[in-house]
């Protein structure tokens, strides 16, 4: 659990500042579950430049509660939480100083979104909160007021959690707070999980991830892990101390994140080098008569496939449908072995490419349409799918036919600006697995939105 906060102060000499406003959002990594926002009477003058910056003046604070009146609420809402702030060193120092004046030692673990951003979103022109969130397309209201800045920090932290593909933030949170966040009983763990699409992480009590998976119903899938009787499930059941998760909304995003994070984290109960999830591929070549031919073969790493398949039967089904949809020749697609005409030519369902009766230009145009639709080679595009919330969408970025990564954006924000788009994208490795995942998903979900850049 995290307590995302922002504090506005009077300004002045070091360790003599007073708090004028505080906002704390209790955040479980997915949603805000509690909040506390209040003006504070600092019982001292506010520096003029601070008044100009925040709009908070002494008249506004005359009847506001003094810090000792809200101290108990701050302790309660941050209990068991890691403090998260933009420039956390400043906010933590101010808060600790105020508590020390009351004779209370206030201690919490803390995370700084400035430092996390520098690590996870490098090469930004500025890491000030206002400039950073604008460059990332994160909406912010009431800038330089505690509530507005804290809300922006929540959204930034959510983005940083997505970009942390090695899951160091989650692992540290589990390790630091085992008694508050972990329940040893399987039923207790399951009761805290949602029935949503996403990626889940099974942890030991020291925070180590021992298994990563994806599901369209996380709670149901974890229940299966805890009730299965196979050897691997029994080992997981004996070691599990906590399950964390990341909502994705989109099954495609979940598949890509699962694939990437298994390779990065190498959990002991995932196969060390996850077996290729495809076996066959569709290739093309031009014959002596200038016709484009298709062929299905086992994966050959020396060749560039049009698309890939999980098994031979899936590939054959694809070719069978393509023959009907694009009026292709059975012989030239490799589905009918013959030295003369194909079967469909005999029943007038083929235009005669197999016997050079149809001009190769006409035939090749149709087969090129098939290839173009089922391959993203050389394309600059964004695949837009469901997001985690109703006003959000996911974006999968492909540049020059290469998968670059994924991210989430608000429906109110344009993603046609490539610089903004790249800033919200979590970079991921482009490999044969990601190509197969994307191509297979696009084949099954023909209505999914694709934006050509």
Image (cartoon, helix red, strand yellow):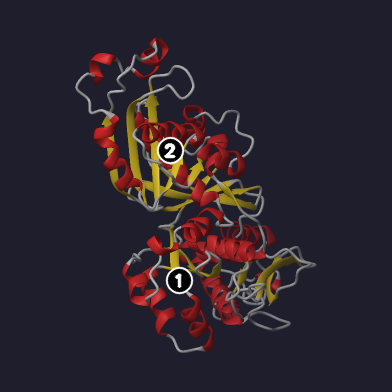
Which x, y percent locates residue 190? 35, 72
Residue drawn at (28%, 35%) of the image: 37
**Residue 453 in sight in this render:** no
Q: Residue furthest left?
A: 63
Q: Which residue is mark 1?
A: 241
Q: Please say if the residues under marks 1 and 2 sit with CB atoms less than 8 Å apart.
A: no
Crowd rating for badge 1 (residues with CA inside 10 Å; few <14, some 14–19, many 20+): many
Which of the two discs, 1 and 2, labels the residue nearer the N terminus? 2
* Picture quadrant where residue 92 is located: top left
Residue drawn at (51%, 32%) of the image: 132
Which x, y percent locates residue 291? 71, 65
**Residue 361 in sight in this render:** yes
Q: Of 416 and 158, which appears nearest the observer?
A: 158
Residue drawn at (38%, 19%) of the image: 10
**Residue 153, disc:** 2
Asked whether, in this view, residue 98 is left or right of residue 35, the answer is right
Asked whether, in this view, residue 388 is left or right of residue 112, the answer is left
The total of numbered circles placed on residues is 2
Q: Of 160 and 77, which appears nearest the observer?
A: 77
Asked whether, in this view, residue 2 is left or right of residue 418, the answer is left
Which x, y percent locates residue 31? 35, 51
What is the quadrant of the C terminus in the image?
A: top right
Q: Of 250 and 95, which appears nearest the observer?
A: 95
Q: Residue furthest front?
A: 103
Indicate the secondary structure of the residue bearing disc 2.
Answer: helix
Q: Nearer the viewer, mark 1 or mark 2?
A: 1
């Amino acid at each position: 659990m995290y307590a995302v906060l922002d504090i506005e102060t009077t300004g002045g000499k070091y360790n003599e500042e007073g708090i004028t406003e505080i906002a704390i959002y209790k955040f479980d990594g997915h949603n805000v579950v509690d909040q506390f926002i209040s003006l504070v009477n600092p019982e001292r003058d506010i520096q003029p430049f601070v008044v100009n910056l925040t709009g908070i003046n002494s008249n506004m604070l005359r009847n506001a509660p003094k810090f000792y009146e809200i101290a108990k609420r701050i302790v309660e809402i941050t209990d068991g939480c890691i403090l998260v702030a933009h420039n956390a060193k400043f906010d933590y120092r101010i808060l600790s100083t105020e508590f020390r004046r009351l004779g209370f030692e206030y201690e919490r673990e803390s995370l700084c979104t400035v430092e996390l951003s520098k690590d996870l979103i490098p090469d930004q022109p500025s890491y000030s909160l206002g400039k950073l969130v604008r460059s990332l397309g994160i909406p912010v209201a009431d800038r330089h007021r505690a509530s507005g800045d804290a809300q922006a920090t929540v959204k930034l932290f959510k983005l940083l959690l997505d970009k942390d593909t090695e899951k160091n933030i989650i692992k540290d949170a589990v390790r630091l707070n085992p008694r508050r966040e972990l329940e040893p009983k399987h039923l207790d763990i399951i009761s805290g999980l949602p029935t949503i699409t996403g990626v889940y992480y099974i942890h030991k009590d020291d925070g180590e991830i021992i298994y990563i998976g994806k599901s369209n119903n996380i709670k149901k899938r974890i229940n299966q892990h805890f009730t299965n009787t196979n050897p691997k499930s029994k080992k997981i059941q004996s070691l599990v101390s906590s399950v964390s998760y990341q909502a994705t909304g989109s099954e495609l995003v979940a598949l890509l994140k699962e694939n990437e994070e298994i390779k990065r984290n190498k959990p002991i109960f995932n196969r060390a080098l996850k077996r290729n999830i495809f076996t066959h591929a569709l290739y093309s070549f031009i014959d002596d008569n200038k016709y484009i031919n298709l062929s299905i073969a086992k994966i050959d790493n020396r060749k560039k496939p049009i698309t890939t398949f999980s098994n031979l039967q899936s590939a054959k089904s694809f070719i069978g449908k393509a023959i009907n949809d694009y009026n292709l020749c059975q012989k030239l697609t490799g589905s009918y072995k013959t030295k003369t005409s194909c079967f469909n030519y005999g029943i007038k369902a083929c235009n005669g490419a197999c016997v050079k009766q149809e001009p190769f230009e006409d035939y090749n145009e149709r087969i090129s349409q098939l290839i173009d639709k089922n391959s993203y080679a050389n394309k600059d595009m964004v695949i837009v799918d469901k997001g985690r919330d109703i006003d959000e969408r996911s974006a999968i970025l492909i540049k020059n036919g290469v998968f670059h990564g994924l991210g989430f954006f608000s429906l109110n924000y344009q993603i046609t600006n490539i610089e903004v788009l790249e800033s919200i994208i979590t970079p991921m490795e482009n490999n044969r697995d990601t190509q197969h995942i994307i191509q297979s998903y696009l084949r099954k979900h023909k209505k999914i939105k694709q934006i050509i850049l």
